[in-house]
Amino acid sequence: MEEQVFIARLLDPATQNAAFQKLINDYQRPLYNHIRNIVLDHDDTDDVLQNTFIKVFRHLNGFKGESKLFSWVYRIATNEAITFINQKAKRRGVSIDDLQNSYTSQLKADIHFDGDEIQIKLQKAIALLPQKQQLVFKMKYFEEIKYEDMSEILDTSVGALKASYHHAVKKIENYLTEN
């Protein structure tokens, strides 16, 4: 379905519920994966995903179509996930780095994580990166999001994203070869 037609259906009270259900069906799995890459915990991911869809629904009338619907929804999900981990770290009185390190240490016991030792090592290396580099690396490496789409989602230039990804890859390579 062409995006403009779909957006019109989302904004029309007569077709809004059916269109929003389609949006949920289309975006639920990829958004879950995107959010999970940021917050790492399954239960937290479900909470952030639910909050994301609530926020999308509440702000549909504010969507101006200046970006793709995909980018707009992903920006909301990304902001919700980052806000969530920042608040969780603050509530626990720990740094975001410490929170993420505790999550990566618990991945082996997580029944929703199906990675092996190498994946756990990779997650530990990623957790050592600055937050922006983590985000860019995960979006590019795991989700295969194009730099142009990432640029809209993160409101950052393509050049800066490429540089962040390059630096992240180098740091991860160094970590994996040293450990």
Image (cartoon, helix red, strand yellow):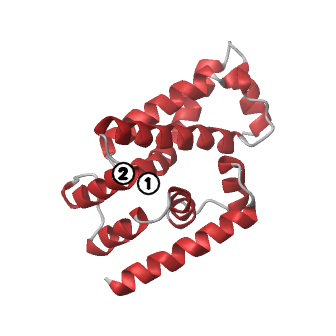
Residue placed most toward the observer, 89 or 12: 89
Q: Which mark is residue 45?
A: none
The residue singled out by tag 2 in the image is: 40
Label 1: element kind: helix
- Looking at the image, is 53 positioned above or below residue 127? above
Residue 174: x %, y % from top left: 44, 83
The amino acid type, in three-letter code, at marker 2 is Leu
Lateral position of residue 61 relative to residue 115, left or right: right
Residue 112: x %, y % from top left: 28, 52
- Viewport quadrant of the N terminus: top right
**Which picture quadrant has residue 179?**
bottom left
How far is disc 2 from disc 1 in space, using C-alphas?
Answer: 6 Å
Residue sitting at x 30%, y 66%: 115
Lateral position of residue 141 relative to residue 98, left or right: right
**Which picture quadrant has residue 159?**
bottom right
Residue sitting at x 37%, y 65%: 123
Lateral position of residue 156 relative to residue 115, left or right: right
Q: Residue furthest top?
A: 14
Residue sitting at x 45%, y 51%: 38
Residue 96: x %, y % from top left: 39, 50
Q: Residue furthest left?
A: 109
Residue placed most toward the observer, 151 or 115: 151
The residue singled out by tag 1 in the image is: 37
- Looking at the image, is 122 positioned above or below residue 75? below
Label 2: element kind: loop
Residue placed most toward the observer, 65 or 130: 130
Rate crowding at label 1 as few (under 14), some (14 to 19) or many (20 or more) other CA atoms within 10 Å. Answer: many
> Are the residues tagged 2 and 1 within 8 Å (C-beta)?
yes
Residue 157: x %, y % from top left: 75, 58
